[in-house]
Each structure stands twice: as C-alpha cells, then as structure tokens.
Amino acid sequence: MDIKIGKTTLTLILGDITLEETDAIVNAANSMLAGGGGVDGAIHRAGGPKILEECRKIGRCPTGSAVITTGGNLKAKNVIHTVGPIYRDGNSGEDGLLASAYRKSLEIAVKNGIRSISFPSISTGAYGYPIKEAAKIALKTVVEFIIDQGKPELVRFVLFSGRDLRVYEEALRDLMKIKGVI
Ligand code: AR6
C-alpha cells in the first residue's frame, strides 16, 4: 500500500528490513545499544561489527530517543537506533514513548540529510506492544511529522508478517478517513 502526503510517499510492505535500500533503516534497539534478538539481531548480523563499534562509542540511548550510526555492510548507509517502550499495562506512558521513538528517528534523519527511511514495527515483538495500538500510534506520528515538515521524501514501513502488514494497512485506512490526506 502506497499513499502520497504532499511530495512524500508513505509505503507499507512485507519484507526484511535488512535488505532495504533506503538511505537509512531504523533499528528497534534496547537502551544499552547492546544488540539483541529480533530485528536488532538481524541488523547487526547483516551489517557487521562496525555498527556495534559505533554503538559502544555512543553508549546509551534512553527509551523514546534515537541515535545514528553507519550502516556498515548494509545497503542502507545509516542505521537509526531507537528504543521503544516495554509494554506493561498501557497506562505507563507507553503511547507517548512509542510516538517519541518514531518522531526522534525522523528528526535525526532529517538533520542528517536522509531522504528515505525504513521503519520496522517498533516495540511489537519482544517488548510486547499490542500491534493494533502500536500501528495507530506509529502511523499517526509519522503522518503528522510529514505534514509538518514536508520531509523525508520516502517513508517505508517494512512489516515482517502478512498479519502485521494487514494491521498496518487497516490502521492507515482509518487514519486517512480522519485526516483526509490521501
Ligand atoms: N525485518 C523487519 N522486521 C523484523 C525483522 C526484520 N528482519 N525481524 C524481526 N522483525 P523486536 P521490540 C519484526 O522484538 O519489540 C531486541 O532484542 C518483528 O516481527 O525486534 O522493539 C532488542 O535488542 C516485530 O514485528 O523489537 C530489544 O531488547 C518487530 O520487528 C528488544 O528486542 C519488532 O520486534 C526490542 O523489542
């Protein structure tokens, strides 16, 4: 699914984010920037040791923030590491922290001249965020950023299962009805 928001294209696809050729891909990291499982493990495996080396130099990244490193051996030149919240009960500020993870990733991208960026579904794996709620927040935050800034040129969500893709597609259709930005 593809939509246009001003000059920006927003795309939802099924795929493996480590194969993306956008200027940057986003990693769903932990606050120690220590690598791990899920998409984090896949990105470090595919990108090689240079990424972890830079992460060590940076140190930590608080939940809801983002940092940038090289893409190492990846096709993407940069990896933006962001830390989504661990889902507890939905009343512990998770929504604000998840929105912040997307917003800060886009801010650091634009600041670094990145024109195309791919996101995974942050927090919806090991961190347990219910995907329907997470998709709403992810898409609303990204669409509002694009409307406000007119950048970047391309934002892709790379979903890892057909079910995840369908949830995001439904959330985007609902958001379009509210915002009327198609
Ligand atoms: N491409 C795209 N999406 C992927 C890929 C891939 N190659 N691999 C997994 N996903 P998770 P979190 C999806 O657990 O919930 C790590 O250990 C996956 O199906 O990777 O934010 C970190 O070090 C799910 O939909 O991230 C942290 O400790 C989504 O990516 C912790 O997990 C996110 O799942 C972060 O947990």
Image (tube, grey):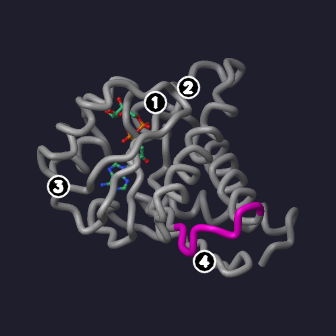
| Residue 46: mark in rendering | 3
**Tag 4: amino acid:** Thr
Residue 80 at x, y percent in the picture = 40, 49
**In the rendered view, does 11 fall on the left or right side of 140?**
left
User: Residue at left 54%, top 67%?
Assistant: 155
| Residue 9: mark in rendering | 4
Identify the secondary structure beneath mark 3: helix
Which of the four quarters of the rendered structure image does ligand 1 lie in? Answer: top left
Q: Which residue is mark 1?
A: 127
Q: Are marks 1 and 2 in contact (CB under 8 Å)?
A: yes
User: Residue at left 58%, top 77%?
Assistant: 1
Instruction: Choose mark 2 or mark 3, whichever is in front.
Output: 3
Identify the secondary structure beneath mark 2: loop
- Residues 92 and 14: in front is 92
Q: Earlier in the sequence, mark 1 or mark 2?
A: 2
**Tag 1: amino acid:** Tyr
**In the rendered view, does 106 fall on the left or right side of 15?**
right
